[in-house]
Image (spheres, rainbow, N blue to C red):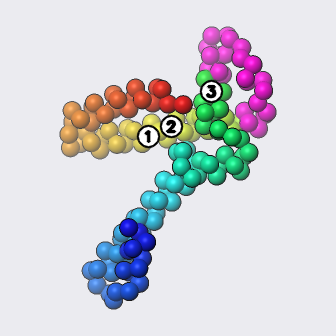
Amino acid sequence: MASLAVVVWMRVSDGVVRDVAFVVMLIGGASTVLFNGNPLLRFDGYYILSDILEIPNLGQRANNYFGNLTTRYLFGTENRAEKEATNAERFWFVAYAIGSFVYRMFVMVAIALAVAGKYFVVGVILAFVGCGAARYET
């Protein structure tokens, strides 16, 4: 839609059609960059960050590492996987696990609140389902 809007915007003269095409172009392009370029979601930005850091499976390894840290400090269990990571990887694992979790929760709550504003029961159900799904996210 955004690419078609660019063509329309370039070919028509000033007026409502050009203004609508500009808005579609701006929103479509910006949303694509914001979602695909976001490294906290498993789209293009995630794979770019993973390649730059040279850490394959960053999301899964970060969640596993953070889970191991949690069980280590809460229950006193030791896990060999923690020792196999380098210091730089440990930093990125903790930062990515926390950042991606906070971002997913923010998006889930924002969507649930937006839906609950129009359809309260559906929004509450969506929030409960989202909390359950977030628990099993890896």
Going from the N terminus, do you reach mark 2 or mark 3 first?
A: 3
Q: From the top left corner, tell me how far across and down residue 106 is, in percent.
A: 44, 40
Magenta part of the protein: which range? Answer: 68-90
Q: Which residue is mark 1?
A: 106
| Amino acid at the residue labelled 1 | Phe
| Amino acid at the residue labelled 2 | Val
* Secondary structure under the numbered disc 3 in the rendered image: helix
Q: Is residue 34 left or right of residue 110?
A: right
* Secondary structure under the numbered disc 1 in the rendered image: helix
At a point 72% along the width and 46% down the height, the residue shown is 53
At a point 38% along the width and 74% down the height, the residue shown is 5
Q: Which residue is mark 2?
A: 102
Q: Is residue 64 left or right of residue 3?
A: right
Q: From the top left corner, tell me how far across and down residue 43 is, in percent.
A: 53, 49
Q: CA distance from mark 1 to mark 2?
A: 6 Å
Tell me the tag on residue 64. Answer: 3
Q: Is-magenta flag for residue 83?
A: yes
